Amino acid sequence: MVESEAPLVMANDMAKKYGDFIALHPLNVEVHAGEFFGVFGPNGAGKSTFIKLLTGQLRPSKGQIEVLGVDAVADPQKVKANIGIVPESESPPSFLTPKEFLEFVARLRRVEDIEAKVEHWLDWFGMDEKRDTMCKDLSKGQRQKVMLAAAFIHKPKLLFLDEPFANLDPIYQRKCRQWLLDHVKDGGTIFLCSHVLEMAERMCNRMAIINDGRVLAAGTVKGLKKNEQETLEDVFIRLVGRSIEDVEREEKANETNEGSEEE
Amino acid sequence: MPGATIVSRDWDDVAEGTPLNTGLGTSAQGQELHEPLRGWSSFSATFRVMFKEEGRKSIEFAKKRQIVLFPLLLTLITALTTVGLQFLVGDSSAQVADIEQKTFTWGELRFALHLPLLMFSLGMGTFAFIGHDAIVHRAGTKNYLLAAPALQPLPNSVAHFAYFIKDLCFYVMLILSPVIAGMALGILLETFNGVNTPLAWSSLPWTWLAMIITLGQGLAFAFLGSALWMRGRPYTIFGPLAIVAFGVAVGLGQVNLDGVLWGLYVQSNQSPLIAAAALAGCVVIGLLASALIIDDFDVSVVQREEMFVPIYNRLAFLGDGEIRLIVAKEFVDLFRSGSIKKMTVSYAVPLLVLLGMAWLVDFAEAPIPINLLSYAPFLGFFGFNFYSWLTILDSPEFMNGLPLRVPQLIRAKVIVYFLATSWISLIFIVLMAWQLDEWTSLPTSIIVMFANSIYIVALTAFLMGLRPNKAIFDASVMIWFWIGTVLPLLGLFLLSFTQGDVSLYGNWWERASQDGLAATSAMYDQSMVEQGYKGMIAISVCLLGASALLWKLMDRRWGKAEFSN
């Protein structure tokens, strides 16, 4: 494979199991430079597990993971040092102020001119007045802004975002969306997980839909639609809804069988 | 440009285990990769911020004024103790003629200083457990820097080591240094008021250093123990066995305690070389414990059988109110978090140690005048730990949106404490009665034990609410806690000397009141035994009454508080 075609992110048979529960079935994935790749699925589909495995936050039960040429299982610290992560539900440390937390992250990530960068991102997210308020006293949206700023502050080429706009107001959703699109235009790469399909239509050039830890379909947003009239929501319900109906049907069938056996 | 691809396979189609890394062929596409900060630079970046975080955490509960008051209180108490040292050690003008028999030696006093400090630090140093909790709860309402390695390029081991050093510094600042300042104040009082104290200026730096070493040793060993425990078998089996074996060896006098308590050894020998080696030893053990911490950020996803309704149904004796619901929820938390095992063990171990002590005393035929009733009041103290643990099992913030009030949750936790531990206490006191062969004192001991146990947990709950762990630095709370616990405990302990086999010490209390340190034991006195018995029952009844009052007053103190721990 020539260097320019080599993927930035690749996993081979990556899977995760907790006891008997399979959170993510083995999957192979490749993401290339300059892509805005989205993984969509209902709540509990395995999206967060997926992103945590790729970013070295979880160890896989099976398979290999490599990011930017670094083995994410053997050296997760190096992977984390060179990417940006916005987690789904994690908040910044409760007893630090946004400014302190950004300074801490910038220091860990060897950012140059820390003070200017911290000021820039506090200003960018409209957090000037809250810079010295402890994070525990911020609203959920404000905490999310701090987490986004912490992921952007070292300008990583590769970003992993898990429900990045949760709790953000529409103004900052638009502002962030535009920043991310510009980032990709400038050669950056984004791996996004969400259940908000609107993001796929507006931002992703490729996407996958997963449910119960399995990939149901993948391709371009346009390619996933059966025809021009079909919306992405229709596709989602067609794929995920049917699989949920299948499960319910199977459960009902099992109950009927058990009932008849008891009789 | 090739596009992203993704495809799933069946679980059984893929071999188990992580394959050997052969390289998948990804590339950074010309991006210069940074090496993550490691070693000293990552430690220093983390330590400073952690220190700030710790200060804020303490202030949040105790407010700035109390954070200052706590060290001041310690200084004052130590200054008074320093002045009173002349009555305790044997080389002062206040002593009676027979110094050897009536006073403590410096060695004994030093031991009394270092042993509790070691116990305290052993209790506070389980950083691997604390770190695991921080990581598990990082998506909750409160997040701490200790969980930062999950997202940031910071090794978990460095974060833990920074936490260890931060805690050590914090305790030195807030506890040890004020104690030394108090000693200095006591010596200064001698200059101004003509009060005699046998403590010399030259001993202060050594005492300070020795206490830091004991504190560091306790924190480091507890850290190491918790780090090994988190690695699972075989440490979870051999660790407790080793601790029990060590305890028995100490009890049988096979281990020299001077060597075990590094700080005590340093204070006794005052060798700079040994002090440096001991300090280095603490740091090395802390480093070793940190190295044993693995970068594991897994939060188990486990499906469980329904537990809430079955437990709720068993609690019918609590009526149909909210308390029953909360108690059921607390029990589910206890079982599901796995804390029931840890908490039961941590509650039972000190009791087993007491039992072991009784056996050892009997084994060595030592004439220590302690009977069954002397042990009974101490059980209540272990309730404080259990209650503290109960308050950190889960974040109660979600209750702010429910028609519940904080006093209800506090009461529910007290009930859970009582239901979860009373059987252990009962078994212990019965075993103790068997060991000491004091069956006649058993009914009274049970009354004393339960009264004291209920009272101390009720007092803890009343004073500290849902945040007992943070109340340690709140001077006003600690003063009330001290007055509320030490006075009745001391009363019960002293009165217990009038009971049981009194041939050794007779009317010790009466004579001590008359003759002070010159008191000698006298013969058995039936009326004194009766008075002592009545006194103990009266104190126990008072404690039960006080518990009921605190139970009632819980609404006034915590009625308007919000759910937060």
Image (cartoon, coloured by chain):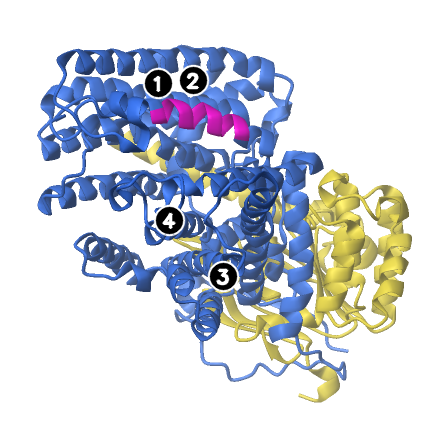
Chain colours: A yellow, B blue
Name the image quarter holding the N terminus of chain A. Answer: bottom right
Between the C-alphas of marks 2 and 3, the distance is 54 Å
Stretch of the chain drawn in magenta: B479-490
Q: Can you identify the residue that label 4 sits on?
A: B91
In the rendered structure, which amino acid carries the disc numbered 3?
Trp
Q: In terms of sequence position, does the residue under pointer 4 or pointer 3 come before the other?
A: 4
Residue B91 shown left or right of residue B444 in the figure? right
Which residue ends up furthest to the bottom in the rendered image? A2
In the rendered structure, which amino acid carries the disc numbered 4?
Asp
Query: Depth check: B554 or B438 in front?
Result: B438
Between the C-alphas of marks 4 and 3, the distance is 20 Å
Q: Can you identify the residue that label 1 sits on?
A: B315
Between the C-alphas of marks 2 and 4, the distance is 60 Å
Query: Depth check: A216 or B350 in front?
Result: B350
Residue A202 shown left or right of residue B340 in the figure? right
Q: Can you identify the residue that label 2 sits on?
A: B324
Between the C-alphas of marks 1 and 3, the distance is 56 Å
Image coordinates of residue A83 in percent, x first then y, are 71, 69
Dots 2, 3 in contact, CB < 8 A: no
Dots 1, 2 in contact, CB < 8 A: yes
Crowd rating for badge 4 (residues with CA inside 10 Å; few <14, some 14–19, many 20+)? some
Residue under disc 4 on the same chain as residue under disc 1: yes
Name the image quarter holding the C terminus of chain A. Answer: top left
